[in-house]
Image (cartoon, helix red, strand yellow):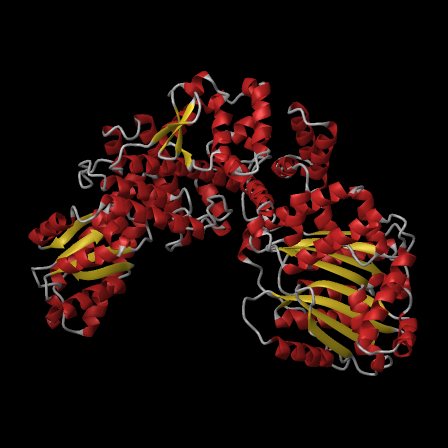
């Protein structure tokens, strides 16, 4: 690329910059077009680097007159792996004491400024050779950059001196330990999993950075690798017998898969974007030739290809890091025998005979069991891992039907320690899916429900990990009730089996709970579990959604709800097991789904059901009497006599005590006794005593648009309503109770916030104030690209009242609840109760409704309401 003689005029400079920018954009567009026609990764890297090389060399020649400096490509650009929108990493190597040269500083500043002006995303450093050495001793990133460099322009002799001085600068052992710690921190940033639904192709575990890690460490092994020869690092590792030719081919195959995805992602996004966001998955799948099938979307096929590649990269990363550590070790391996078949080498498990697994496949499960039973073992050695990959096809029907293997699998689940690590390792090494074919079908299976953020197999293993956390005494402060119940549960392996099978039928046609129940029952029978234990596991799989659905969609203050749930679980053992599985399951969907409100609902349902199971004859009348007695005791402690609140209780009616719990009754009574016939709305707010949000009570003469006004108010505050109890007293006052949650992470003064809610909401309830339209907020990015079909169902209650249950599933967005409230107002629908359940970007809301004056909704009104809701939500 040629540059004309520079002009001294600003307009000429601007024209030249525009010309260079236009030329660069044209060349980059040609790269994109050529790649679309012929997606050759090596060619794209070569052409892109050549383009930038020539441009930078020309700029250097024209603008940089100091011949004692040099321009060096480092990082990904240095190794010739420049993606469409990656940063162009540069080192400007200057002579010693050059900071005193003002003219040189001005030249470099102008050079970098021009690079940015023409559209190059430059990351640069300006250092002398001594500064490079000093910085490298302090910063592992600088050391890494020194490993991969190319001279672009400038003083050749200075560059050769740079290579000579930095060639042996890195201490291989210290570098290995530092890079290993860096990788562990990077993996932790992504929750130590590659199986997010929107993974980072470069940085996530199993991503391209894990391959870079292997290459960087390989260069420092002092095996005479020539990183500038043009030969692949994988070929050089093969030449030194560190990897096999087949492994080299497989690594290159999966590396190309990941590189291709990253290139396509940069082109599609038009920026340096390394996250496989929902925004791009559909279009990328189409670009790469995937098509929807009856069983899988094109994007699901794309992502499963990605997950297969990262799984392999993770495995090779683990094997080679262990092998590199052995190469770097200056001491002979410390070996001690474990049994006739296995030994420990430097705390890693190895087989005494390389053909052990081939000759005795049952030793496969024995290896995992030994890792559980021997805490001094830190994992499997590189040789054993390689042999395991060669023989995993032996985990077949014969293996599965072998009584010894069945017994050993249950033994693995029954160990006091290491269950989670063992099953994760079995999945990572491809054994778990081979042993449980149904599990193999959900490996890398995406979940398009907007609240699971992991693949199905990763979610299942997260649930198992959560159950294991309940077993650890040092973690009992996290979930005290769960820890107590788990410690008392007589057969934890049954819970682990239920976790393994609870979502195993996802992605099949039909109810995954029922299909999974069949798989679980068959597995338990084949593995010799008793009928009682098999029945419990199958029931847990079938019922794993029931407890969360009841807690989050039903009125738990209604004794009938508790009685119905107690009939479902039948006994305390089932209740304990289902509660543990439910908490573990919800927490395993996403770091953001679990909150204090859900925790309290589940715990409340657990305790109330446990009481009902202990006293099955305890009916609604007794519940009411108990609540009245307990509320009276609380009020007496506040110095409030019964004469002051008994008249109010009469006006509220008996059903009030069915709908509200003891603590609510006492709170309402303390605040409302002086205001029984108030002409103005009474609004009171407090932090929930259970730590699950803010409780808001509204007491006012009944008005048709009250719920719509309240929803509008909290929408505009940015708060989510998660529970609403709408009650009308005998004397025609509305007594509405809400629990709201702040969805932002901002810190607030709660005393000021509560006063604001009480004052501002009171004024918003004034009927002379015009009712505002619902907010029309933007839907989330995930919803835009992975929308769910809105569902509205209206069913009559079965307990001889005139109420209907309205269930809504929809994409969550600002203004959704207010929109629903205004539909109620439009069609004269009366709301009695609401449970608002937000799961990520998915809303699952339940409303108890009727027509005016407690009348039943007629069929025509139900149809109109249903159609209108579907249209507006």
Nearer to me, 289 or 41: 41
Residue, x 55% and y 49% (percent of image)?
Answer: 453
Q: Is residue 653 above or below residue 82?
A: below
For the residue pair 620 and 97, the one nearer the viewer reads as 620
Q: Is residue 242 above or below residue 478?
A: above
Is 537 displayed left or right of 19 in the figure? right
**Relative horizontal placement of residue 804, taking residue 253 as reference (left or right):** right
In the image, what residue occupies the spot 71% across and 54% down? Answer: 603
Work out whether residue 328 can be spotted.
Answer: yes
Q: Residue 594: horizontal and vertical position, in percent?
A: 61, 55
Quadrant in the picture for the C terminus: bottom right
Q: Position of residue 72 (x, y in %)?
A: 18, 53
The image quadrant of residue 732 is: bottom right
Q: Nearer the viewer, residue 789 or 633?
A: 633
Res 676 → quadrant: bottom right
Tell whether 820 sits left or right of 106: right
Image location (x, y in percent) of residue 242: 28, 30
Using residue 784 as the reference point, say whether residue 145 is left or right of it.
Answer: left
Residue drawn at the location 58% of the way across and 18% of the way down: 402
Q: x, y (%) of residue 365? A: 51, 26
Tally of numbered discs:
0
Q: Is residue 837 visible?
A: no
Picture quarter with the N terminus: bottom left
- Dividing the picture into quarters, in which one does residue 58 lie? bottom left
């Amino acid at each position: 690329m040629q540059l004309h003689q520079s002009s001294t005029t600003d307009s000429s400079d601007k024209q030249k910059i525009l010309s260079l920018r236009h030329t660069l954009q044209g060349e980059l567009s040609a790269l994109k077009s050529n790649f679309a026609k012929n997606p050759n990764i090596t060619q794209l890297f070569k052409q892109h680097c050549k383009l930038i090389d020539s441009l930078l060399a020309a700029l250097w020649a024209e603008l940089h007159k100091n011949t004692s400096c040099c321009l060096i490509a480092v990082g990904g650009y240095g190794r010739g792996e420049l993606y469409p929108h990656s940063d162009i990493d540069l080192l400007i190597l200057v002579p010693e004491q050059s900071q005193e040269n003002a003219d040189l500083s001005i030249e470099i500043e102008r050079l970098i400024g021009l690079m940015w002006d023409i559209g190059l995303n430059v990351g640069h450093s300006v250092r002398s050779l001594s500064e490079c050495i000093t910085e490298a001793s302090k910063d592992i990133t600088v050391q890494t950059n020194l490993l991969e460099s190319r001279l672009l322009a400038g003083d050749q002799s200075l560059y050769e001196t740079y290579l000579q001085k930095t060639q042996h600068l890195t201490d291989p052992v210290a570098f290995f330990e530092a890079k290993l710690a860096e990788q562990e921190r990077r993996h932790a940033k992504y929750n130590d999993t590659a199986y997010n639904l929107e993974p980072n192709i470069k940085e996530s575990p199993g991503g391209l950075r894990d391959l870079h890690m292997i290459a960087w460490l390989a260069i420092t092994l002092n095996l005479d690798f020539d990183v500038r020869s043009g030969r692949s690092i994988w070929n050089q590792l093969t030449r030194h017998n560190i990897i096999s030719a087949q492994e080299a081919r497989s690594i290159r195959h999966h590396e190309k898969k990941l590189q291709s995805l990253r290139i396509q992602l940069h082109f599609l996004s038009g920026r340096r974007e390394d996250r496989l966001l929902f925004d791009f998955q559909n279009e990328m799948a189409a670009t790469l030739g995937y098509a929807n099938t009856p069983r899988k979307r094109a994007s699901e096929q794309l992502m499963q290809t990605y997950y297969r590649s990262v799984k392999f990269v993770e495995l090779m990363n683990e094997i080679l890091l262990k092998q590199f550590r052995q190469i770097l070790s200056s001491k002979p391996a410390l070996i001690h025998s474990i049994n006739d078949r296995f030994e420990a080498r430097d705390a890693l498990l190895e087989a005494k005979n390389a053909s052990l697994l081939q000759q005795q496949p049952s030793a496969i499960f024995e290896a995992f069991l030994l890792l559980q039973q021997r805490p001094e073992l830190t994992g499997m050695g590189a040789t054993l891992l390689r042999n395991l990959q060669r023989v995993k096809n032996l985990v077949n029907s014969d293996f599965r039907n072998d009584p010894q293997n069945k017994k050993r699998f249950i033994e693995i689940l029954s160990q006091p320690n290491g269950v989670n690590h063992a099953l994760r390792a079995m999945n990572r090494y491809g054994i778990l899916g081979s042993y449980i074919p149904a599990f193999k079908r959900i490996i890398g299976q995406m979940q398009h429900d907007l609240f699971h953020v992991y693949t199905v197999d990763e979610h299942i293993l997260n649930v198992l990990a959560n159950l294991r956390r309940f077993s650890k005494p040092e973690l009992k402060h996290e979930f005290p009730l769960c820890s107590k119940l788990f410690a008392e549960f007589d057969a934890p392996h049954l819970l682990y089996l239920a976790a393994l099978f609870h979502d195993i039928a996802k992605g099949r046609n039909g109810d995954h709970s029922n299909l999974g129940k069949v798989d679980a029952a068959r597995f338990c029978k084949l593995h010799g579990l008793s009928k009682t234990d098999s029945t419990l596991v199958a029931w847990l799989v079938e019922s794993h959604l029931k407890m969360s659905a009841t807690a989050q969609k039903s009125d738990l203050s209604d004794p009938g709800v508790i009685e119905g749930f107690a009939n479902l679980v039948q006994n305390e053992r089932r209740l304990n097991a289902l509660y543990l599985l439910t908490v573990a399951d919800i927490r395993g969907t996403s770091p953001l789904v679990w909150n204090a409100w859900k925790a309290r609902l589940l715990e409340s349902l657990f305790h109330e059901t446990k009481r009902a199971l202990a006293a099955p004859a305890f009916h609604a009348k007794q519940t009411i009497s108990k609540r009245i007695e307990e509320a009276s005791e609380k009020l007496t402690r506040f110095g409030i006599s019964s004469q002051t609140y008994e008249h109010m209780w009469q006006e509220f009616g008996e059903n009030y005590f069915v709908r509200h719990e003891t603590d609510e009754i006492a709170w309402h009574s303390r605040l409302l006794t002086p205001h029984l016939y108030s002409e103005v709305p009474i609004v009171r707010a407090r932090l929930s005593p259970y730590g699950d949000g803010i409780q808001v009570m509204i007491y006012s003469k009944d008005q048709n648009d009250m719920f719509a006004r309240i929803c509008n108010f909290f929408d505009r505050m940015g708060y989510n309503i998660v529970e609403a109890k709408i009650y009308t007293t005998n004397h025609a006052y509305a007594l509405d109770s809400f629990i709201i949650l702040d969805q932002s992470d901002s810190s607030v003064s709660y005393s000021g916030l509560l006063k604001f809610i009480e004052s501002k909401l009171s004024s918003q309830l004034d009927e002379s104030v015009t009712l505002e339209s619902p907010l029309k907020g933007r839907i989330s990015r995930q919803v835009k690209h992975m929308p769910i079909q809105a569902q509205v169902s209206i069913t009559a209650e079965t307990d001889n009242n005139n109420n209907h249950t309205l269930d809504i599933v929809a994409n969550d967005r600002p203004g959704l609840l207010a929109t629903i409230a205004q539909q109620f107002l439009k069609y004269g629908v009366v709301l009695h109760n609401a449970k608002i359940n937000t799961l990520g970007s998915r809303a699952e809301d339940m409303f108890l409704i009727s027509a005016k004056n407690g009348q039943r909704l007629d069929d025509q009104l139900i149809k109109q309401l249903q159609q209108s809701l579907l249209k507006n939500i």
